[in-house]
């Protein structure tokens, strides 16, 4: 049986801590397993920089052999389906399939029909498990744990798989999580807090990009107004608690959800999140190949 990583709800808190420990072990320069016999196919049907290439970095650090799928030059252009494309790579005998796709829970059609382990690199507005793991590792490095911390996740909550995954796992880990941003981007199932109040009282201020590619065509958007009302300006960042940190899954639209000068300020852990990404993905790949 392959050990898929589809979402974090499938993992116990103990399993999540084990993955974070393994990622930290790799980050600290701990010995690596011999994975030179493994072949991994990275199948990104939706655009990606961080997830796709940090998985590739992780695979190369582990001496795996990597197939990077290019949708634009593939037989998708001859109307081959998503399912048949994935089945094709599985039939080659690869050990793991790293998949990103715009459809929520795309993996339900695949589980039970592929031999390789599936690692979810993001499904629509559903889940982004390795992003959440790298977010958790970054928070744990900063605060030593999770219990009792408060986080605000601010921005386009409705379209964010990062927000959905992080809310679930952070609350399971004993954090208080509130959402903030324009009311039209909120979801009733989550607690809401006004933006300035949430920024000033949280240990973790996690900003999100407005995912305009998921909005209906023609939806109006004024970046300057958005920044004025919901952007993390230098003034707002200065109101944050002592020791509080700024996070963002990226890509960042500088000057929209986060001011340009705040992206790399002393409170920002945005590029540290990216550093942690490759180590978390190494841990996720090793777990997937253990079975
Ligand atoms: N954070 C994240 O998933 O970035 P990419 O879309 O560039 O992979």
Image (cartoon, rainbow, N blue to C red):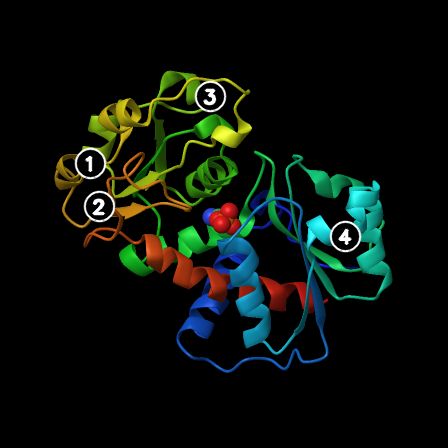
Residue situated in front as seen by the camera: 80 or 60? 80
Q: Is residue 247 left or right of residue 27?
A: left
Q: Are marks 2 and 1 in contact (CB under 8 Å)?
A: yes
Q: Which residue is mark 2?
A: 262
Q: CA distance from mark 1 to mark 3?
A: 24 Å
Q: Is residue 216 left or right of residue 175?
A: right
Callout 2: SS: helix
Residue 96 locus on image (x, y percent): 71, 62
Q: CA distance from mark 2 to mark 4?
A: 40 Å
Q: Which residue is mark 1?
A: 233
Q: CA distance from mark 3 to mark 4?
A: 37 Å
- Check disc 4: other Cα within 10 Å, few if <14, some if 14-19, many if 20+: few
Query: Counting residues from the N terminus, which is met first, the one under dot 1 or under dot 4?
Result: 4
Q: CA distance from mark 2 to mark 1?
A: 7 Å
Residue 23 locus on image (x, y percent): 47, 66
Q: Can you say which quadrant of the picture contains the C terminus?
A: bottom right
Query: Counting residues from the N terminus, which is met first, the one under dot 3 or under dot 4?
Result: 4
Q: Quadrant of residue 64?
A: bottom right
Circle 3 or circle 4, nearest the eye: 4
Q: Which mark is residue 74?
A: 4
């Amino acid at each position: 049986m392959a050990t898929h990583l589809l979402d974090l709800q499938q993992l116990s808190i103990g399993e999540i801590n084990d993955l974070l420990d393994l990622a930290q072990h790799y980050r600290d320069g701990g010995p690596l397993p011999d994975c030179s016999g493994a072949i991994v196919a990275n199948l990104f049907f939706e655009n990606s920089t961080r997830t796709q290439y940090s998985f590739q970095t992780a695979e190369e650090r582990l001496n795996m052999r990597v197939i990077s799928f290019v949708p634009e030059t593939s037989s998708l252009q001859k109307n081959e389906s998503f399912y048949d494309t994935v089945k094709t790579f599985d039939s080659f005998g690869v050990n793991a399939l790293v998949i990103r796709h715009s459809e929520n829970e795309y993996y339900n059609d695949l589980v039970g029909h592929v031999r390789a382990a599936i690692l979810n690199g993001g499904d629509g507005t559903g889940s982004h498990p390795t992003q959440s793991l790298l977010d958790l590792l970054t928070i744990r490095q900063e605060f030593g744990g999770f219990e009792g911390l408060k986080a605000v996740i601010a921005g386009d909550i409705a379209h964010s798989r990062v927000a959905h995954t992080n809310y679930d796992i952070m609350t399971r880990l004993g954090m208080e999580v509130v959402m903030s941003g324009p009311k039209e981007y909120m979801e009733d199932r989550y607690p809401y807090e006004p933006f300035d109040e949430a920024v000033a009282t949280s240990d973790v201020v996690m900003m999100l990009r407005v995912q305009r590619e998921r909005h209906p065509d023609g939806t109006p958007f004024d970046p300057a107004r958005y920044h004025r009302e919901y952007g993390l300006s230098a003034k707002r960042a200065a109101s944050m608690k002592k020791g509080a940190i700024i996070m963002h899954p990226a890509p960042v639209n500088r000057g929209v959800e986060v001011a340009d000068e705040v992206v790399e300020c002393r409170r920002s852990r945005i590029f540290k999140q990216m550093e942690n990404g490759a180590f978390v993905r190494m841990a996720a790949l090793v777990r997937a190949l253990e079975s």
